[in-house]
Amino acid sequence: MLPFQPPLWRMDIVVFSDGHVPLLDELGCRVGVRASPTDPNRCWIVPTYVKVHSDTFNYRFADSINVVAVDHIATEPYDWLLRCDIDTFFTPVFATWRPTKLTVGSVGGYCFDGYDTCDRLHSIGLKLNLTTSLVRDIGSTWYGPAKMIRECGKLSMDIINHLHENEFSADDKDGGVAGWPRWHYGVLTMYSGHLAIPHCTRETGFEKRNDMIDHTSYSKDKVARHAHVHAWQSQPLNFSKVRFLNGEYDNVDVQSLDLGNVQDYLMYMAKVSNGKANAERTITYELLVNETGAVTP
């Protein structure tokens, strides 16, 4: 992605952890924060993060929201923030894509036909005096102006706490698949995002762009049409994060991959970044252009 980035743009990765993670050292990350807009792209570590996950609040995914809700100097230097799950990939399209407003994607879904999940969320939103929206299945990835992302994170955490305290029974919180797909504690962050995003963007609106954010990893579409890809839980033959971790792709020759194809691009990036590629290839503009001859967001 970085070779395609405009010269004056900077894109950092900021990792919050509650202690030392040796793997981050191996990846070249360092403890600190961005000091100057002209410093090169870096991976920064905040090793003093305090988790909200605890014995009394046994929902570990809440920390994926809380990292943008906490006020920390590490996220202050940036104009825009993207918060996403770790099982995601960026394409070169992301290097130049700048949406006009906060943008989300979608992973799977939580509102299904025949179930009253969204009706229940709507009722909770009204009870909390929140701005509601007809947009369903807001995904885990948010990309937008930094101040707005932080505000959405704070509101989402407030909603998570409300849902935890008031909308689920003790049995619901025991884990497993209890309540799915009607009302499931395991997707608390999805429910909170569903309620928070329309309210914290009520003055500007927001967009849901499944084509650009959280695009599915089993797509055979052109890489040039997608900025960010999410490895879902499904297990297609090519590409599946589960199959990759199980070593089922260890013998795949990266020289045979079509890097303009989403599935093959993910395979290549996963193998190279994990040291499992027999050789690296140069990802050129020509490999990624669409039929009109341009990488287009």
Image: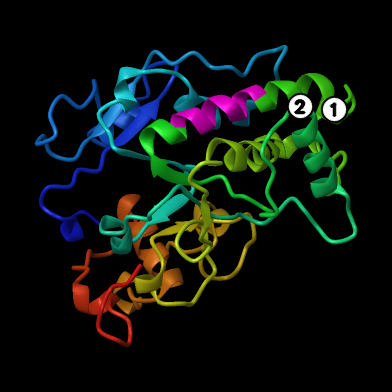
Disc assigned to residue 163: 2
Where does residue 68 sit, x and y in percent of width and height? 45, 28
Quarter of the image that includes the N terminus: bottom left
Mark 1–mark 2 CB contact (< 8 Å): yes
Toward the viewer: 22 or 198?
Answer: 198
Toward the viewer: 198 or 181?
Answer: 198
Question: Does residue 126 appear to the left or right of 130 in the view shown?
Answer: right
Give the quarter of the image for residue 125.
top right
**Does 182 sit above or below residue 168?**
below
Give the quarter of the image for residue 190.
top right
User: Could you tell me which secondary element the residue under label 1 belongs to?
Assistant: loop
The magenta segment: 150-158
Where does residue 223 sit, x and y in percent of width and height? 38, 71
Q: Which residue is at a point 52% across and 49% down the rendered structure image?
A: 205
Question: Does residue 21 appear to the left or right of 42 in the view shown?
Answer: right
Question: Does residue 178 appear to the left or right of 149 in the view shown?
Answer: right
Name the residue tied to disc 1. Answer: 168
**Does 24 sit above or below residue 274?**
above
Q: Which residue is at a point 23% across and 20% down the rendered structure image?
A: 32
Whether residue 155 is in magenta: the answer is yes
First in sequence, mark 1 or 2: give its number: 2
